[in-house]
Image (cartoon, rainbow, N blue to C red):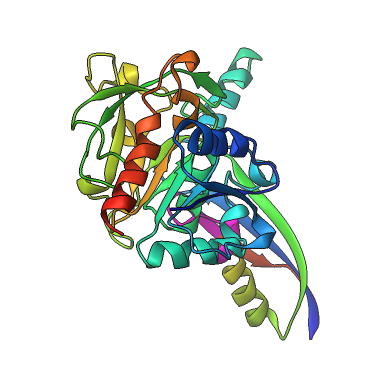
């Protein structure tokens, strides 16, 4: 078993309204930073034991499926860092 | 007949619902701490409003994955009734017991105010004392109440039979202006495919006595009791 650090990024699927992003975009515009696009996502850095990098990825996927993401609105990306 | 109201850490409408059931509707109701499990033979379970687990991650996400939800599934599986109100509705959606999800309002702010709802179906265990198309007044109080149905494909499209309530104007018209949180097609009450699980964002317990400004919500609890009487 090796210690792995995994970066999990949860974001909204294409086309799902992101009210916080719209609001932040407007606030930025008020500060003089007009933007063409602004999206939010949430990042989890998770350290855990796994057999190898493949196993670490599988476990991270399971974490997303079971809790971290909701399949109705979310997609997720997994990066096994070390 | 016996109802259970489940208390999670952060539930804050649990006692209100128990009061509406016990004292207003005369239904024997237990408050059950989530760690104790649903050990008695309950005819119905209510998941109350509040902020279970501080709404961390997503409203209802953590509570939906606690062990007591296995008990709720078991009760629902033998055709017991399950009602989720507000945070309880979010928990049911996160559990996959009703289709879709309740997420951040289209304007991302907490809304607490009266709302008009159109009763879309009266042949359900929760609405049999209403007329189809009837307009009722039941308040809402949430920040994550915007309903999104499952996308067609993997989980299947939302069936109209699953829609229990829609936001509407006082005349019963379902309009964009009467949709306070941007819910898909104004939907704010969703039933499971079997019809014995209802997730709703409005708070019927806050509209269960005239002194509260409306007693329209009381009939949800009374409908459940009537249904259980007639089917036991």
Give above or below for B54 relative to B173. below
Quadrant in the picture for residue A39: top right
**Residue B190 position within the rendered picture, expressed as x and y whole percent measured from the top left:** 34, 44
Between residue B75 and residue B171, name the one nearer to us: B75
Residue visible at 26% across and 35% down?
Answer: B129
Between residue B7 and residue B167, name the one nearer to us: B7
Q: Is residue B187 left or right of residue A46?
A: left
Q: Is residue A51 left or right of residue B67?
A: right
Give above or below for A55 relative to B177. below
Between residue B39 and residue B153, name the one nearer to us: B39
Quadrant in the picture for residue A78: bottom right
Give above or below for B94 relative to B141. below
Residue visible at 58% across and 69% down?
Answer: A61
Quadrant containing the C terminus of chain B is: bottom left
**Residue B58 position within the rendered picture, expressed as x and y whole percent measured from the top left:** 59, 46
Q: How many numbered discs, if any?
A: 0
Q: Is residue B173 left or right of residue B141?
A: left
Residue visible at 36% across and 45% down?
Answer: B225
- Based on the picture, tell me whether residue B45 belongs to the magenta stretch: no
Q: Is residue B203 visible?
A: no
**Residue B16 position within the rendered picture, expressed as x and y whole percent measured from the top left:** 58, 32
- Based on the picture, tell me whether residue A73 belongs to the magenta stretch: yes
Quadrant in the picture for residue A27: top right
**Residue B218 position within the rendered picture, expressed as x and y whole percent measured from the top left:** 40, 30
Q: Magenta residues?
A: A65-76
Residue visible at 48% across and 30% down?
Answer: B24
Q: Is residue B217 visible?
A: yes
């Amino acid at each position: 078993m090796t210690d792995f650090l995994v970066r999990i990024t949860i974001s909204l699927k294409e086309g799902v309204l992101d009210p916080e992003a719209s609001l932040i975009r407007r606030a930025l515009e008020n500060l003089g930073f007009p933007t063409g696009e602004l999206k939010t996502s949430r990042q989890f850095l998770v350290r855990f034991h796994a057999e190898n990098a493949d196993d670490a990825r599988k476990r991270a996927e399971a974490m997303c499926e079971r809790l971290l993401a909701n399949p109705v609105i979310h997609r997720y990306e997994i990066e096994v860092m070390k | 007949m016996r109802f259970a109201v489940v208390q999670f850490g952060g539930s804050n409408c649990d006692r209100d619902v128990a009061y509406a059931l016990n004292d207003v509707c005369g239904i024997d109701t237990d408050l059950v701490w989530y760690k104790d499990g649903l050990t008695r033979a309950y005819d119905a379970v209510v998941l109350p409003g509040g902020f279970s687990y501080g709404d961390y991650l997503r409203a209802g996400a953590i509570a939906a994955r606690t062990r007591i939800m296995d008990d709720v599934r078991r009760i629902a599986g033998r055709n017991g009734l399950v009602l989720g109100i507000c945070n309880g509705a979010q928990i049911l959606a996160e559990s996959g017991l009703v289709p879709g999800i309740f997420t951040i309002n289209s304007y991302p702010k907490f809304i607490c105010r009266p709302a008009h709802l159109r009763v879309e179906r009266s042949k359900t265990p929760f609405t049999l004392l209403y007329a189809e198309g009837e307009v009722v007044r039941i308040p809402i109080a949430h920040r994550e109440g915007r309903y999104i149905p499952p996308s067609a494909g993997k989980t299947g499209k939302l069936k109209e039979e699953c829609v229990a309530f829609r936001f509407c104007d006082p005349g019963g018209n379902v309009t964009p202006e009467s949709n306070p949180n941007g819910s898909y097609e104004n939907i704010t009450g969703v039933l499971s495919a079997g019809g014995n699980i209802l997730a709703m964002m409005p708070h019927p317990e806050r509209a269960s006595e005239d002194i509260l400004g409306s007693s329209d919500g009381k009939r949800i609890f009374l409908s459940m009791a009537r249904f259980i009487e007639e089917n036991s």
